Structures are given as C-alpha cells and as structure tokens.
Amino acid sequence: MERWDLIIIGAGSAGLSAGVYGARSGLKTLILEKYIPGGATIESPLIENYPGFISVSGQDLIDKMVTQAMKFGVKINQTEPVIELNLKGEIKSIKTAKTTYEASAIIITTGCHHRELGVPGEKEYSGKGVSYCALCDGAFFKGKDVIVVGGGNNAATSGLILAHLGARVKLVHRKDQLRAEEILVKDLQKSNVEFLWNTEVKEIKGDKTMKTVIVINNKTGEQREIEVNGVFIQIGETPNSDFAKTAGVNVDDYGYILVDAQQRTNLPGVYAAGDVTTNPVKQIGTAVGQGIVAATDAFGYIRRPYYCKD
C-alpha cells in the first residue's frame, strides 16, 4: 500500500494548483485523475479573463500547469478513478480501480459533470447528434444546423465555438434573456446566432442519428418540430461528490461540498476546492485560489508548524 503525505483527487485547475503548492512545501504529493488532466478548463478554446494571459486556450493553460506540477515533483496518475474513501482516523485510505493508497490529508477537486435535459431521445441519441461538449464535437457539424440549449456562459461559449466552426446555430433558452456575460451575448449577436426565447426542448427524434427536435414556447404554448443535425446541451452542471458524500463529507442540498475559508470540510484532514465546492463563482481563477488555500492549510495540518493554528 503506497503512503503519501497529500493525495489530490482530480487534475483540473484546482487540483493542479494544489499539487504545485503541496509539492513545493515539501509534501509527497499524488494526484489521481479519472480521465486526463484538465477538467472543465480544457473545454475552453479561448480564455481571456485569467490574470497574466491576454488570451490562452484551455489546453495550453492546463499543459503549463501539468508541466509546472511535475517539475516540483507531483506524481499524476491519470485514468485512475477513485472508487471508495475511508476518511476515519488520522490516516486516510483511498481505493482506486488499480490499488489502495494512504495519505495524511486529501483534497477533493473533482469538479462537476454536465446536467442532462431528461427528455425523450436524449440518451438514445447521445453521441449520435446529442452532445455536451462543443469543443469536443463541434468540428463534425461544420455547415450543418445545430441547437444549443442553455442561457449561461457555457451555452454562449458553445454557440460561439459552433458558429466559428461554420455551423448554423440556434440558441434555445427557456427565459427571455441570457444570464451569460454581456460580451459573450454581443459576440453571439455578431456571429448571427438565432435566439429562440421562452423555448424548451420537449423531445429529440431521429432514426440511426437524431433528425429533429420538438420545442415548445412556454409563453404561448406553440409547439413545433425543427430539423437539425445536432443538439448541444449546456444547462448547468452537477458536482462530482457522491463518493465523498458516501464517505461522510458534508454537502449542501445540490451536492456541492461544504467548506470553510480554509477549504476544510467537516472531516479533519479532508479538503475540497474548485467547482465541486459551494463557492458560487465557478471560474479558473477561483479554482486556482481555492486549490492554493487547501494545499497550504493541508501542509499546516500535516507538518504542524509553530505558526499553524487549528
């Protein structure tokens, strides 16, 4: 059984930042990642609000973070999902699909996953026209008709990605205005994206692949069927916290992990940072900051320096 000072679960912006600070403080640090490093950050083709960069792609930013973390001695095990946590006692146990680890402290930075519409045809045509990632799948829809569902920054960004790739985009939102940042809304308008206000998707239909979407205007009750080649669903996210909740970590009514100002959970030596927490601002910058705070406090918890207070 491998023993580590600090184990971080999740290799997104929060996890990689925590890894840098953990390793630099002298902690033997391991990051476990279910897929590949990056999390939600790599879904952003262009980031313009991260300090120090006029513009940078999400993939480039993550690549730099990974390189930096490894430079300071962080070990990153990708494609190794965590199956079970035992957080009782001073030493924490982390069971993965491959082995079991022990650590003095852990930081949970598992982020969120895309929320589903829950309408007929969504699951049936997932990967056959239905997608949750414009960056991943947008290239397949050049010159085709697509619908983006949602009203936040993710929906607006997805619409822009698809429009820039040459798709003909309709953005469907159940209200009469977007909650996305104003600059994104203006960019959508410049990109000739068509807005369908007060509109909801009721069903996705097709044969081998999806062919049409049935929508309804929630003000007038008018229902119609639209021929499209793809639907990109961007209606929010659900935190990846079930495994932590099962292990006794407190979450709120929506599943987000409850933390204090030091990113501490209700369990000693267990921290959380990034989008999986209750912090209302889900941005790369806030995730990085939370990861730093969590790793710094974890160092104090493990090493007990004279200046550290419980």
Image (cartoon, rainbow, N blue to C red):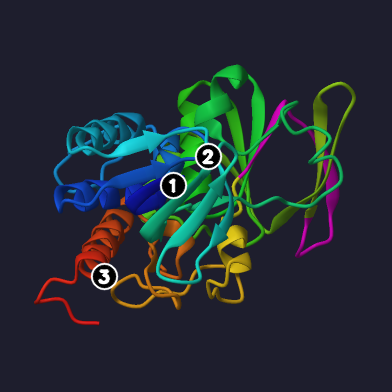
Q: Which of the two labelled residues, at mark 3 and mark 2, occupies the earlier sequence position?
A: 2
Contact? badges 3 and 2 (CB < 8 Å): no
| Above or below, comparing residue 81 to residue 280 in the picture | above
Q: Position of residue 155 (x, y in %)?
A: 53, 46
Reading the image, the residue beneath label 3 is: 301
Reading the image, the residue beneath label 2 is: 34
Residue at image point 46% right, 74% down: 258
Q: Which of the two labelled residues, at mark 2 and mark 1, occupies the earlier sequence position?
A: 1
In this view, the residue farthest toward the left is 306
What type is the residue that disc 2 sits on? Lys
Reading the image, the residue beneath label 1 is: 10
Residue at image point 22% right, 63% down: 299
Disc 1 crowd, CA 10 A, few/some/many (<14, 14-19, 20+): many
What type is the residue that disc 3 sits on? Tyr
- What stretch of residues is rendered in magenta? 217-233
- 219 part of magenta stretch: yes
- Cα distance in 3D space between marks 1 and 3: 20 Å
Contact? badges 2 and 1 (CB < 8 Å): yes
What type is the residue that disc 1 sits on? Gly
